Amino acid sequence: MKYTHDRIVRDSNVLGGKPCIRGTRITVQQLLEDFADGMAAADVLAAYQQLTEDDVRAALAYAAEYMDHEGLLPA
């Protein structure tokens, strides 16, 4: 499955191909971990000043799309 978000890129030469915000080395995973640790969107944007709100939304959309295509495990 190929996820298409113009702000999210995967390059095997950058961080082992992890999905990153275009033009940065900030991974979708890092942003998700920051939110899981309790950071608000304003905190994330302050911590990563090169990001925009659209970048953060794209990372969340990418993660949601990824999860939507994950297989279900039997109960």
Image: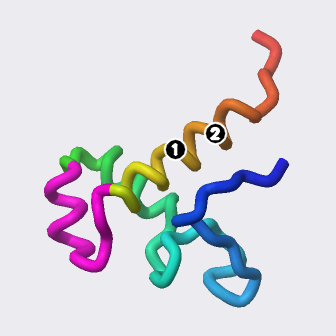
CA distance separating discs 1 and 2: 6 Å
Q: Mark 2 packing: few (<14 Cα in 10 Å), some, or many (20+)?
A: some
Q: Dot 2 lies on which element?
A: helix
Give me the residue at 59% from left, 63% from top. 6
Q: Is residue 35 above or below residue 10?
A: above
Label 1–label 2 contact, CB within 8 A:
yes
Say which mark, if any, is on residue 65: 2
Looking at the picture, how far across and down is residue 23, in whole percent?
49, 83
Q: Name the quadrant of the C terminus.
A: top right
Q: Is residue 40 left or right of residue 12?
A: left
For the residue marked with disc 2, what is the amino acid? Glu
Which residue is at the front of the view, 20 or 57?
Answer: 57
Give me the residue at 46% from left, 46% from top. 60
Looking at the picture, how far across and down is residue 36, in whole percent?
34, 44
Q: How many marks?
A: 2
For the residue marked with disc 1, what is the amino acid? Ala
Looking at the picture, how far across and down is residue 9, in whole percent?
63, 71
Q: Main secondary structure of the magenta part?
A: helix
Corner quadrant of residue 17: bottom right
Corner quadrant of residue 56: bottom left
Q: Dot 1 lies on which element?
A: helix
Q: Residue furthest bottom?
A: 13
Looking at the picture, how far across and down is residue 31, in whole percent?
39, 58
Q: Is residue 50 above or below residue 19?
A: below
Q: Over which residues does the magenta segment extend?
A: 41-53
Give me the residue at 49% from left, 70% from top. 21
* Residue occupied by mark 1: 61
